[in-house]
Image (cartoon, helix red, strand yellow):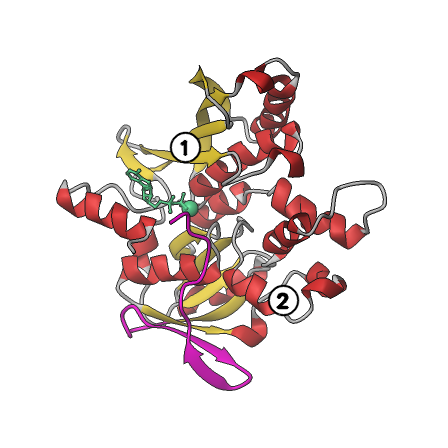
Amino acid sequence: VRSEFDFIDQIRSRYALGRIGDDCAVLPKDAETDMLVTADLLVEDIDFRLDWTTPEFLGHRSLAVSLSDVAAMGAAPTHALLSLGVPEALWKTDFLNRFYGGWHELARKHAVELVGGDISRSPDKLFIDSIVFGEVARGKAVLRSGANAGDLIFVTGFLGGAAAGLELLRTGTVLGPEISVTGRHLLLKQLQPIPQVQTGKLLTEYNLATSLIDLSDGLSSDLSHVAAASGVGATINADVVPIDPAIFDISSLHTQELDLALNGGEDYELLLTVAPHNAHIALDLGFHHIGEITDSAGKLELLHDGISESFFPKGFRHF
Ligand code: ADP
Ligand code: MG
């Protein structure tokens, strides 16, 4: 059965669409600037559940996932389009006002202006189509394809928290007053993810990353996209992957911590590769060194307790 990634690859080669395949498309704007654009589709009961979130969180999240893709090019977000397919029952409530409230609060933080969109009625489920534009100095967008053998692999923050939060929601945890501090942290990682916008911009200013991607599908999947685009392999040291410490407080997730960090998606941290002579800068910025790029094209390896095993992409897939 073909995956969504195979399908996109097929379209790309059949119609020779060279701009498809990164977190954003890069379009020339003027002599100094390139324009970036990215689209995300969020479908009720596939990408979110209304009974697990709030309208404000969902508005925030719809923008955050696209801001993260702009950050994943080392660019600054500027404008957005937001289109909705809304079931009639939801239209009659205050849902949309609250949704736009959550959306706008995040937009204001990053000076992103809503410049349009579309609204239609949907028979049953809510559909959200988020498009965000960004800008970067001409030729400076950081692609997935720039990793070189010998580069060091870093992630910008702790992993697994959002997937742990999803697991808590699945097993009936709600964001009520009785929840523990760590439980609340994990639910918010899932419901209200924080895109790494400032860090993305910093990376181009410092010329630090040879390649860059955001962690939306999970470390194993997203790393495999970088490896494929760059024609390289990678070794990850599982013993130093920064697992979100809150996960260790949840007894029902005991023994799953590493799996959540390696394969759980939606943390929206950045994964970057850095030339060895710049490694000290990445460390000074507080990034976590988790592995190395190798010259074994397409081959991912996981070192765990001194043992090396094959590391297969196991992250989130729609198909
Ligand atoms: P991300 O997780 O960074 O949002 P995706 O995995 O959704 O990226 O998509 C991978 C690449 O495929 C991106 O460049 C995206 O623009 C492109 N893509 C996804 N869906 C389609 C589609 N239906 N038609 C054309 N390109 C698509
Ligand atoms: Mg992405």
For residue 310, what is the image quadrant? Answer: bottom left
Instruction: Categorize mark 1 by other alpha carbons within 10 Å: few (<14), some (14-19), many (20+).
Output: many
- Residue 233 picture location, percent across and down: 33, 70
> In which of the image's four quarters is ligand 1 placed?
top left
- Residue 65 picture location, percent across and down: 50, 39
Q: Judge whether 311 appears above or below 92 on screen.
A: below
Residue 207 at least partly seen = no
Question: Is the residue indicated by label 2 positioned so its CB lies within 8 Å of ligand 1?
Answer: no
Near-viewer residue (135 or 123): 123
Local secondary structure at mark 2: helix
Q: Which residues are magenta?
A: 293-319
Amino acid type of the residue tagged 2 in the rendering = Glu
Name the mark nearer the viewer: 1 or 2.
2
Label 1 or label 2, whichever comes before in sequence order:
1
Amino acid type of the residue tagged 1 in the rendering = Gly
User: CA separation, marks 1 and 2?
Assistant: 35 Å
Residue underneath mark 1: 134
Residue underneath mark 2: 257
Q: Residue at x 38, y 35 (%)?
A: 38
